Amino acid sequence: MARIVMADDGISFDGRTAELGPLGGAEIAFASLAEALADRGHDVRVRNNCRQAISHRGVEWAPFAAGMPAAADLYIANRGHRLLALMPAARRHIFWIHNPASYLLKARYLRRLWLTKPCIVFSGAYHAATFPWWAPSDARIIIPYGIAGEFHG
């Protein structure tokens, strides 16, 4: 069992939000990944802009004000470059992006990427091609979005 910390600095949401109303695709993907990792037996903790701490479907959700856990086997920073350096003690760092990567070619983003050298996760080959070969990363991985069963057929 791995200790996994995930962070997102976008809108306020938690594991229950999609059950109560509409939620964006990147947020649903993030929450779904957290739940899938917990289902596999991992200790999953999320830090984001949620309103209050909750435990939902095996995932601990808490606002950033609760503080970051001291350590993790895996740290997943979702979208926001400011999140990259929040878990320096994590054994492995992933930066999961959802938009074309050209925005990462600005100095303020490149600096953080050079310092942390995360593995960057893209959703497809075209998406990965938007990040030039010379830009810093530990690795580049393509993981297509999962599609919930109710959308098949």
Image: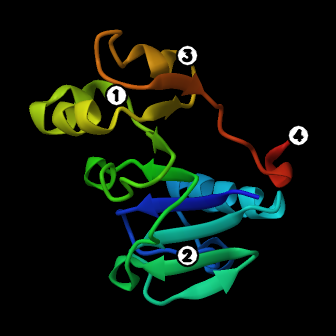
Q: Name the residue under label 2.
A: 14
Q: How far apart are marks 4 and 2 (CA)?
A: 28 Å
Residue at the spot 64% in from the left edge and 79% down from the top edge? 16
Looking at marks 2 and 1 on the same chain, the residue that comes earlier in the sequence is marked by: 2
Q: Is mark 3 on a helix, strand or loop?
A: helix
Q: Position of residue 72 (x, y in %)?
A: 54, 59
Q: What element carries label 1?
A: helix
Q: Nearer the viewer, residue 143 or 100?
A: 143
Could you tell me if the residues under marks 2 and 3 are in contact, i.e. CB atoms within 8 Å?
Answer: no
Q: Mark 3 points at which residue?
A: 125
Q: What residue type is labelled 4?
A: Gly
Looking at marks 1 and 3 on the same chain, the residue that comes earlier in the sequence is marked by: 1
Q: Which amino acid does label 3 sit on?
A: Ala
Numbered label attached to residue 101: 1
Q: Distance between the residues labelled 4 and 1?
A: 31 Å
Numbered label attached to residue 114: none
